[in-house]
Image (spheres, rainbow, N blue to C red):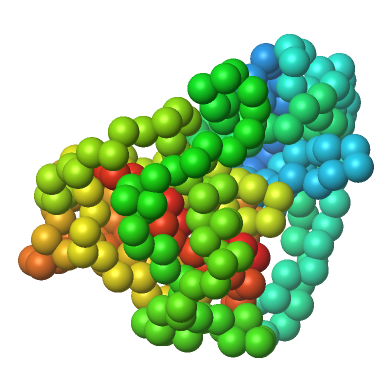
Amino acid sequence: MDIRHNGKPMLAALALGISFFCGACQVGNKAELPPPPASTVRNIEVQAGQVNILSAGPLRPGAFIMGNPPRLIIEIKNAELSSQAPASGPGVGDFVKEWSAEQKTVMRQMPEGEAKEVPVVSVTLVLNKNITYKLTSESSGCSVALEEVKKAEDESGKSGNIEIPKELYAQVQKIGVTKSGQPTGTVVVPISPGDEKAAREMLNQIVPERAPVVKLPAATALQNITYKATPDGIEITITGDGEFRNYEPVSLDLPLRVAIDFFGVKSPMKKKTLLVNNGRTRQIRVGSYPDKTRVVVELSGNKIKDSRIVSVQNKLLVKIVY
């Protein structure tokens, strides 16, 4: 410091320091903002037969169908709707008439026992016709595939139920359910004439045309598992390389699950878990054991109304009513 200059050199140094500090602030303001979290919905694309919900990472949506008018509601918990994302638009193709999206909050019970508000992005599709859907979580969001629900046709070409020969579905089973909606473990209850009729209606969905009465060899391996949502529940179709002759339905608690044990059947399927997340069903899992393969349907709630299992040739259909 030189006192003879009345502090000017010191002031110049101080001014230089202030200039450097402000310059650093200015550079900081120009830096790019951090990207939004993966749970931020950036865009919604409604295409013919498919809906894409885009984000920075995978999403885990749930969905359900409502009537009057028919609508498909897609809900994504712990997500936020970006201000740049479209909030509504017209439909594309034959399935969707119009759609809209909104940000909501719902109360959710935490593991600690307290209720907490959770942000939810809700997408509503107003439908032109009855559809089924399949949710898929992807690396950049999620997608919903839409498919029309078609009635089976008999030999005359008229819509209606097909008479499935009794020899093809000799076994119809139900898991017992208490009045409070709790499945009764491994107890399989007798079926009624109404259950028999319902089983025929179920079979029409997996046998689209009259099937010859052919006795297939016993199944040794699973080949495929598919599912679709219904207005009152979910239906899972399990396909094997032959006829399922030795299987047993069971129910499990915490969380609530409906499972089918296939004895003497292996599972070469590479994909062991199907994420459903439709609001009431979480996922479908395949487990391998030395003497059996177990297919587990894991539910979100703590009760069901009905669970019916019926097999025909190389397919087994599980219908769970919420």
Q: Residue at x 46, y 80 (%)?
A: 189
Is residue 19 visible to us here? no
Between 14 and 45, which is closer to the camera in this rendering?
Answer: 45
- Along the horizontal axis of the image, is 300 left or right of 101? left
Q: In the image shown, does 260 or 217 lie closer to the viewer?
A: 217
Q: Please tell me in which quadrant of the rendered image residue 259 appears.
A: bottom left
Decide: is 282 above or below 315: below
Please determine whether, in this image, residue 173 is positioned above or below residue 313.
below
Q: Left or right: where does residue 173 sit relative to residue 63?
A: left
**Percent position of residue 74, x then y:** 72, 42
State whether residue 152 is above or below residue 314. above
Q: In which quadrant will I find the N terminus?
A: top right
- Residue at (29% x, 56% y) in the render: 286
In the rendering, at what x and y percent does residue 56 appear? 58, 33
Q: Report which quarter residue 257 is drawn in.
A: bottom left
For the residue pair 84 and 93, the one nearer the viewer reads as 93
Camera-nearest residue between 315 and 45: 315
Residue in view at x 84 percent, y 31 percent: 126
Residue at 24%, 54% (x, y): give it.
244
